[in-house]
Image: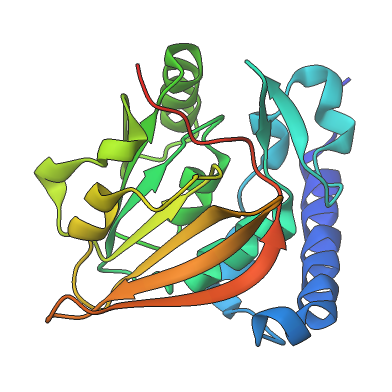
Amino acid sequence: MHASNSKRAAERAALVRLIEQEVRDTAGYTGRATLDERVLAAMATVPREQFVPEFDADSAYANIPLPIGCGQTISQPYIVALMTDLLDPQPDHVVLEIGTGCGYQAAVLSQLVAHVYSVEVIAELAAGASERLASLGCTNVTTRHGDGNLGWPEHAPYDGIIVTAGAPSVPPALIEQLRPGAPLVIPVNSGMHQMLQCITRSASGEINVDDVLPVAFVPLVEGP
């Protein structure tokens, strides 16, 4: 039996409160005690239950990652919200996502920017996400099956790039496709762990890296 719209709306509102609490709890790491209200509103709008397997629908609004098949996961909502906030999305922005997965992060971004380009290395996930996003009316998201390490140069430079998989190092193509001053939000391997980083490149080519928070993501792979 499907939950009612009012129940789902209440679950999303409760999730936003959990996210706000975790943001306060991790402020010592991130330097952020609050997130942009637009980001929280997007988190309260996108129906996460549509992006998880039906057998996990009752867990859709738990603040945890969930499996989506093909050995991949939908990220913890707090991490989705934090990474979105780090991207500083604005209504006129064009952004690039590496790692479409089930399409949830792209759907959140679609509420906040002019257009999202998203690349997914696993063909099955790319096709499923494209259909799902279309069915939910996310007409400002364009997806493709490809190697995220290469970015999507045809639409560069981007006003922000977000990577939803752990990279052994920052792919040079992504740095090159950033608009000067725009953020690249990416988990990068650091010894035994991953560190969520926010990277910017100045007009003169100077790279600035801010460590944000220890995280755990599935690996960014090459292909297809």
Residue 21, percent from left and from top: 85, 75
- Taking the image as shown, residue 126 lies to the left or right of residue 148, namely right
Residue at point 46% right, 37% down? 99
Quarter of the figure with residue 147 = top left
Residue 112, percent from left and from top: 42, 63
- Taking the image as shown, residue 8 lies to the left or right of residue 69, namely right
Q: How is the image coloured?
A: rainbow
Residue at point 71% right, 28% down? 52
Residue at point 67% right, 69% down? 213
The front one of 64 and 16 is 64
Quarter of the figure with residue 59 = top right
User: Is residue 2 visible to us here?
Assistant: no
Q: Quadrant of the C terminus?
A: top left
Residue 104, percent from left and from top: 57, 41
Where 85 sits versus 96, above or below?
below
Residue at point 35% right, 35% down? 148
Residue 117, percent from left and from top: 30, 43
User: Is residue 65 visible to us here?
Assistant: yes
- Taking the image as shown, residue 83 lies to the left or right of residue 208, namely right
